[in-house]
Amino acid sequence: MRKIKFKSVHLRLDVELYEKLKNIANKTNKSQAETFRQLLRKGLAMEYVNENDDSIAKLIRHQVDVAMKVHVERLAALSAKGGHMAATAAFLNVQALQDLVPAENKKDVRTMYDKARVKAAEYLRVNTKEYIEKDF
């Protein structure tokens, strides 16, 4: 077993602080010296953490970024696919209207498209229940 070397430190404590130290020592069944050493170690550890919390936060942030990168890229790819599908559907509808509706029943496709875009934009601004209850 390794013998621990100690240095002696003399200090003065105000009565209130001394009483708190004494009470803690009594509750934990340890000497005042051992209680003081433990409290000092904890205080120094907390001080180290407080001084280095930026480093710790950067490390944690980096690890979270590494872990999330795959998921973020996957969501971005899904979002891009959704945009492509929506654009394809919109232009397919316009093309179908132009190709399949007889000339005498055709309306201006651009006007229909603009109205649909306004409705879509409004739909995205309000929740679904409010949108359904609106009278167009």
Image (cartoon, helix red, strand yellow):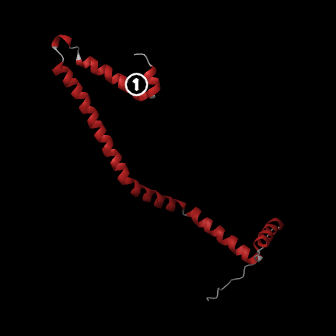
Tell me the SS state at disc 1: helix
* Residue type at the position of mark 1: Glu
Q: Is residue 134 left or right of residue 82?
A: right
Farthest top residue? 104
Quarter assignment of residue 96: top left
Task: From this view, report whether residue 52 is shown above or below residue 125.
Answer: below
Q: Is residue 132 left or right of residue 32?
A: left
Quarter assignment of residue 65: bottom left
Q: Residue at x 30, y 21 (%)?
A: 114
Farthest right residue? 15
Image position, residue 71 (x, y; %): 37, 51
Q: Residue at x 18, y 17 (%)?
A: 101
Task: From this view, report whether residue 86 is shown above or below residue 78.
Answer: above
Image position, residue 26 (x, y; %): 80, 72
**Residue designated by label 1:** 122
Q: Residue at x 42, y 16 (%)?
A: 135
